[in-house]
């Protein structure tokens, strides 16, 4: 039987992990502002009163690890009740929603256009990877922007994460990561330069990653923001939507 994967199976940059019956805490003091990494992953949908209790619990972790944002991932495949939504709006929480995808079964035939790519393996092409990311990181939330360079360096030093560069005419036009999670591979941080979008590059990169997953006899998983164009790419390539979930976050005042 094919295993069923969940959001909690995906890679995290957390260095601290504490599971309980009703939530899991994940955090990393080196990424204090990174509300994507530092969070409570909830096993239940809270009401307004329970949210206040969860904030008190989160504060204990935040003080211990040195975090700057409340962040909660709500249970998969659950809508947000009106009572909770009203409480979130009153407290100025930000909301983001994500889809977990899994690659379809079957052999992958790469598109006719060959992708010119290389794996990051030395200081020179790691710097090319970092330089390519800089303009994209300048337009994201400053809290996440501060953590990005360190996350890239952490990935470069992790033997289970491979970073890649794609080239056209000698220029870097895209980057992505492949993470070996044991039972599956995960594609992450897929970024295509603005001048090279809508040319099928993202599809080629995903198909190449699927091929690498198949060679390892593993499925390929991905996490996509529902407002990101990558949603349509994964759907167009026949990826299966495993689950939908939401994150709520706000600064700790």
Image (tube, rainbow, N blue to C red):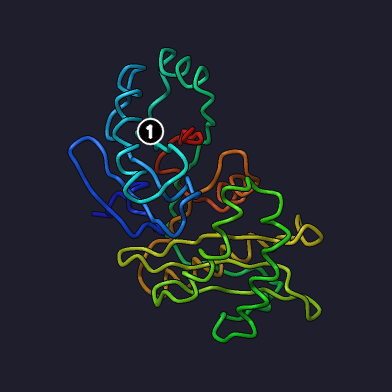
143 lies above or below 119 = above
Q: Which residue is mark 1?
A: 74
Task: From the top left corner, tell me how far across and down residue 21 is, in percent.
Answer: 17, 38
Q: Number of marks in the image?
A: 1
Residue drawn at x 52%, y 65% as measured from the top left: 150
198 lies above or below 250 = below
Q: Nearer the viewer, residue 218 or 195?
A: 195
| Left or right relative to 230: residue 24 | left
| Left or right relative to 127: residue 235 | left
Q: Nearer the viewer, residue 36 or 101?
A: 36
Residue drawn at x 58%, y 55% as measured from the top left: 146
Q: Nearer the viewer, residue 222 or 104?
A: 222
Task: From the top left corner, tell me how far across and down residue 71 is, in percent.
Answer: 43, 38
Residue drawn at x 69%, y 72% as measured from the top left: 112
Residue drawn at x 31%, y 29% as measured from the top left: 54
Instruction: Please tell me how crowded label 1 is: few (under 14), some (14-19), or many (20+) other residues with Cα within 10 Å.
Output: many
Q: Nearer the viewer, residue 211 or 16?
A: 16
| Left or right relative to 20: residue 113 | right
| The N terminus - image quarter | bottom left
Which of the 4 image quadrants contains residue 16? bottom left
Outermost residue toward the left in this view? 21
């Amino acid at each position: 039987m094919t295993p069923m994967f969940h959001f909690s199976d995906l890679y995290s940059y957390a260095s601290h992990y504490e599971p309980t019956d009703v939530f899991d805490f994940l955090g990393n003091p080196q990424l204090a502002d990174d509300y994507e990494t530092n969070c409570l992953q909830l096993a239940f949908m809270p009401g307004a009163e329970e949210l206040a209790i969860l904030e008190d619990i989160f504060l204990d972790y935040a003080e211990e690890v040195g975090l700057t944002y409340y962040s909660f991932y709500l249970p998969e495949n659950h809508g947000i009740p009106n009572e909770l939504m009203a409480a979130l709006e009153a407290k100025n929480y930000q909301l983001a929603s994500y889809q977990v995808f899994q690659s379809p079964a079957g052999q992958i035939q790469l598109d006719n256009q060959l992708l010119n790519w290389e794996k990051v393996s030395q200081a020179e092409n790691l710097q090319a990877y970092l330089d390519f990311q800089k303009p994209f990181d300048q337009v994201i939330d400053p809290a996440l922007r501060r953590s990005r360079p360190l996350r890239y360096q952490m990935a470069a030093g992790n033997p289970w994460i491979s970073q890649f560069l794609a080239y056209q005419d000698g220029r870097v036009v895209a980057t992505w990561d492949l993470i070996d999670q044991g039972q599956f591979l995960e594609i992450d941080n897929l970024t295509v330069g603005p001048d090279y979008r809508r040319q099928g590059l993202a599809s080629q990169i995903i198909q190449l990653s699927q091929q690498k997953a198949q060679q390892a006899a593993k499925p390929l998983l991905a996490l996509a923001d529902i407002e990101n164009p990558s949603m349509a790419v994964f759907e167009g390539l026949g990826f299966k939507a495993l689950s939908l979930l939401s994150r709520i976050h706000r600064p700790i005042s």
